Each structure stands twice: as C-alpha cells, then as structure tokens.
Image: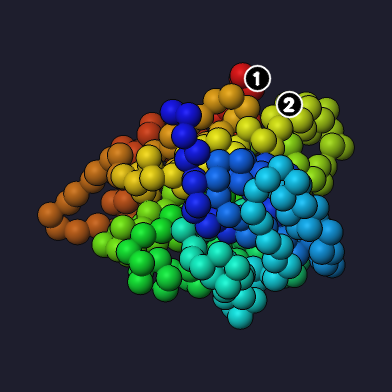
Amino acid sequence: MNALLLQDKVIIVTGAGRGIGRGIAMMAAANGAKVVVNDLGGAEDGSGADASPADEVVNEIKAAGGEAVSSYASVTDWDAAHEIVETAINFFGRIDCVINNAGNLRDAIFHKMTEEDFDSVINVHLKGTFNVSRAAATHFRAQTSGCFVNMTSTSGLIGNFGQANYAAAKLGIVGLSKSMALDMGRFRVRSNCIAPFAWSRLIGTIPTNTEEEKARVEKIQQMTPDKIAPLAIALCSDAAQDVSGQIFGVRNNEIFLFNHNRPIRFAHTAEGWTPGKVVDRVIPAFKSDFCPLERSGDVFSWDPM
C-alpha cells in the first residue's frame, strides 16, 4: 500500500516533543496528516515547562512540507485538555484521532513512594488520557467517526520493580481504552492500546545501580522510539476501521497482540463457601494455575529482534 494512510486527517499527539511522540508526529505528517504537536516541555518527572520541544517538531514537519501546529497545554488539566482539542478544530477544522502519549516517571520502591510520586504519574498518564479523550469524544460522536490510540506498558500488563504508580496508571489506561471502545463503538469510534518498548529520556531515568539493572537498560537502548510509529499510524488509518479494544506491543521489529483477562479455573459448591473450605479446596485446586509473579523482562526474555 503506497497511498498516504492519513491523508488530510487531523491528529493530536500528546507528549510529541520528544521520543516516541515525536516519531509518531513526524510519521503522521509524512503520511498526510495535519498534526497538533502537544508537549508541555516538562522534565522527566513532569516538572517545569518549555515550548521549544513542540516548536522544534512543528518546524521539522513544516520544513518537510507538512502541516502542524504547537500546543503547550497540560493534559492533566480538564480545561487545558479541551484547549488541545480546540486547537485542532480552530486550525484544521476537525479532529480525527487522538494519540495519548504524554507521560512522566517517578520510580520508587513501593514502601518509599510518596503520595506526590503516585499522584503525579496517575495525573499525567491516566487522568491525562481521560481528559484529552473526553474532550475529543464530543466531536467524534457528532461526526460519527474517530480513533484513540493509548500508550500502555508491560509494567502494568506484566509487572516491574519500583513502578507501582506507573503500573497502576498504565493498567488503568487499558481499562479506560476498553471502556471507550465499548461506549463509543456505536458512533464508529475505536480505541486501542500500544505497549511500546523503546529507549527514551523517560526510560533513561531507570536506575542502573546493579548489574541486572544495567543489562536491562542495555537491551532497551537497542529499541529506538521511531519503531513505535508505524503501528500507531496504521491504527489511525481507515484500514484499521474494524480494529478496536485491542492491546498491541512493539519491541524493535516485533509486534505483539496481548490477550485480555478471562477466567481460567472454576470452583463451585451447592452449599456455599466458608473460609475453611476455600483454604482446604479452592486454593489447592487453583494453585497449579496461579500466575507467576513475573516482571516484563522475565516474559520478554530474548534479545530484541
């Protein structure tokens, strides 16, 4: 397929000033989209603001012959999120897809994690995804079309050390995306998730104090952010109009489809359960099928291909 997949579509990419978001914004524009490049320009932990990352991406897109406009609004604020969507409407006349990519990291082992650490990550990832998506949903419903692409993570889908806040936010995004797909499907609006494996400035904050941590980071460094963009662009295109409610992963040149939680064992008693019966019968019966307590690297144990 040689045609521009996103010709004349209007795409919002949050967190588009650097890393994965930048790669998606650039490829969207190269595929004919008009792009709202949203980036607060904050530090890795979400603090501060800087207009230059968004402006630099917009200038690159324009220099290549594309159309783009900057947005510096914070996804964590309800009104500001609506301003992001209104930027698309005001400059380009419509909105076709939202790619929720904005993020921050405040890693800490659970017993040392502060309330601020937790709230900050939840607000950017989970609430930010809700805010921008909800702002766009009104327009999507009115035009009976639209697309959400939401960034999740294997830290939530599988697990990792020191990322309780991030894992909670990212698994929350999976539930949010599925609900959006269910609620908005009647209006021909779809919603999907991508769990990206890529080296970025956020991943650059991962500790490398032990040999195990250093090895993990060295593997991640092989996976560049631009590898995520092709799947994101494909999901925004009309060619994916029947794809909704799914969870994908991208790891270098590998693309994965994740399953969804479903019951795998069943126990029943006509007389009802007591705590003692659960201990005596249910736990021993289910134990062989318990999900192992694994981290992302335990499941994706081979070198990126």
Residue situated in front as seen by the camera: 51 or 202: 51
Badge 1: residue crowd in 10 Å (few <14, some 14–19, many ≥20) = few
Camera sees residue 280: no
Where is the C terminus found, in terms of image quarters? top right
Within 10 Å of disc 2 (Cα), the crowding (few <14, some 14-19, many 20+) is: some
- Looking at the image, is mark 2 or mark 1 nearer the viewer? 2
Q: Residue furthest left?
A: 270
Farthest residue, direction front: 65
Q: Secondary structure at mark 1?
A: loop
Circle 2 residue: 222
User: Which of the two residues, 80 or 86, is positioned nearer the viewer here?
Assistant: 86
Q: Residue furthest bottom?
A: 79
Residue bearing mark 1:
303
Residue 219, located in which quarter of the rendered image?
A: top right
* Figure check: 40 above or below 282: below
Q: Position of residue 129 (x, y in %)?
A: 56, 63
CA gap, disc 2 and disc 1:
9 Å
Identify the residue shown where x is 58% and y is 54%.
34
Tag 2–tag 1 contact (CB < 8 Å) = yes
Q: Nearer the viewer, residue 296 or 84?
A: 84
Q: Residue 159: horizontal and vertical position, in percent?
A: 59, 43
Q: Residue drawn 72% across and 50% down?
A: 62
Mark toward the start of the polypeptide (2 vs 1) = 2
> Which quarter of the rendering shows the N terminus?
top left
Looking at this view, is 291 or 130 the one in front?
Answer: 130
Q: Give, as a three-letter code, the residue at label 2.
A: Gln
* Residue sitting at x 82%, y 30%: 214
Q: Residue at x 36, y 67 (%)?
A: 143
Q: In the rendered image of this protein, does residue 155 appear above or below residue 119?
A: above
* Residue 178 image offset from top left, x and y in percent: 39, 55
Q: Amino acid at mark 1?
A: Asp
Q: Position of residue 46 (x, y in %)?
A: 77, 63
